[in-house]
Image (cartoon, rainbow, N blue to C red):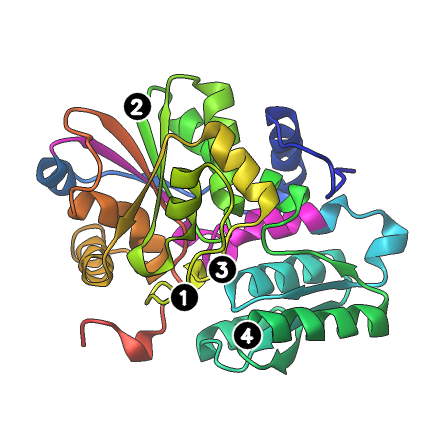
Amino acid sequence: MTEPNAATLDLALIRAAHARIRPHINRTPVMTSATLDAGANASLFFKCENLQKVGAFKARGATNAVFSLPDDQAARGVVTHSSGNHGAALARAAQLRGIPAYIVMPSNAPRSKQEAVKRYGGKVIFCEPTLAAREEVAQRVLQETGGVLIHAFDDLRVMAGQGTTAVELLDSVADLDVILCPVGGGGLLSGVAVAAKSLAPDIKVIAVEPAGADDAAQSFKLGRFVAGNPPKSIADGLLTTLCERTFAEIHRHVDDVVTVSEAGIVQAMRKLWEVLKLVVEPSGAVAYTAIVENRVAIAGRKVGVILSGGNLDLDKLPWQ
C-alpha cells in the first residue's frame, strides 16, 4: 500500500497507481485540431480528462487511494471535504469497492456537483462555505464514522493517481516539448510533473492558474509556499491553495507558473466547444487559456494541454 505520509512522489508509485486503477477509469483520448494548431502556431495535443469517469481527472487519484486501502480500513468507509469533483470521484471509487463515502460539501457547491456525489451513492454533509468549516465538519465525521480521510490533493496516493494522466499522454505522444497543466491544490500538477520529468527529462512543465487565485505563482516566484490572498475566480475547482507536500514537488519539477484572466478562461471554454465540440468547465479550460492569451512561448513546438474536467453547470453558461 502507498503510504499517504511518505516523503516524495516517484515514477514507481505512479506506475503502481496506473496498474491499480486501469480497470476502473477511462484511458481518455488525446485530441488534435488543425484549426487550433494554426491559431497557436504550434502542434497541440489535448488530453481530454473532461471525458474521464465522473467528468474529471479526480477519478484517478480517488480510485487509487480507495483501492490502496487494506480491507479493515476500507470497511469503515472514506471521508473527504470537496466542492465537487473529488467528492464525486471518491463516492464512485467507494461504490466500486462497496464501502461508504461521506462527502462534506460547502452549501454553495454547484448543484450539478452535489447531484453527482449523490448519484454515486455518497452521503453529502453540508457545511458553511469556508475552508475552516469544511475541515471542522470533516473531522467530526471522521470521529463519528471511524472512516479514512482521503484529502483531495494532500495525499501521496491521490497525487500518484493523478500522475497517470501524464503517463498516458506521453505514451500517446512521446516527443512532446511542453505540457500545460492547471493548478489549484497541486495534486494533478505534482503527479504530472513527476511523471513527465521522469519519462522525458527535457520536457517543460508549465502550470496555469487564474490571476485571481495565484498562490502557486506567488509561491513559485518566492521559492516557498505562501497561501496568497483569498482566491476568486470562475474556475471554482481551482480555488484551493497548495499545501507543503504539493508545493515541494512543484518546486522540484515545474518550470514555470503563469496566470490567465477570467475573460480569457471563458473565451477558451467557448473555443473548445466550437472547434473540438468539447464541454470543458472553467478549471478544465485554464491550461488552454494560456495559449489563447499568449502567456507561453510555444511557437513551432509540440504541446500537451490537459483539459482537466467537464462538469459545467449548463444552466449557467458563462457566455449567455
Q: Earlier in the sequence, mark 3 or mark 2?
A: 2
| Secondary structure category for the residue under label 4 | loop
Q: Which image quarter holds the N terminus?
A: top right
Q: Which residue is mark 1?
A: 236
Q: Please state which amino acid type lies under the numbered disc 4.
A: Thr
Residue denoted by label 3: 240
Magenta residue span = 41-65
Task: Estimate the x, y position of residue 149 in percent, counting from the top left.
Answer: 73, 59
Is disc 4 in contact with disc 1, using a CB cutoff of under 8 Å? Answer: no
For badge 2, the amino acid type reads: Asp
Q: Residue furthest right?
A: 72
Q: Residue at x 33, y 19 (%)?
A: 175
In three-dimensional space, the C-alpha distance between marks 3 and 1, rounded to whole angstroms, equals 9 Å
- Residue 173 highlighted magenta (yes or no): no
Of callouts 2 and 1, the N-terminal one: 2
Q: Is residue 294 visible?
A: yes
218 sits to left or right of 132: left
Mark before the other along the chain sequence, 4 or 3? 4
Residue kind at label 1, given as amino acid type: Asp
Position of the C terminus by quadrant: bottom left
Q: Residue under circle 2?
A: 177
Label 4 vs 1, first from the N-terminus: 4
**Residue at the location (50% across, 29% down)?**
252
Which callout, 3 or 2, points to the residue nearer the camera? Answer: 3
Q: Nearer the viewer, mark 3 or mark 1?
A: 3
Residue bearing mark 4: 130
Question: In the rendered view, would you say 289 is above or below 191?
Answer: below
| 178 relative position to 64: left or right | left
Q: Is residue 92 left or right of residue 234?
A: right
Marks 3/2: CA–CA distance: 28 Å
Asked whether the beta carbons under mark 3 and mark 2 sit within 8 Å of each other, the answer is: no
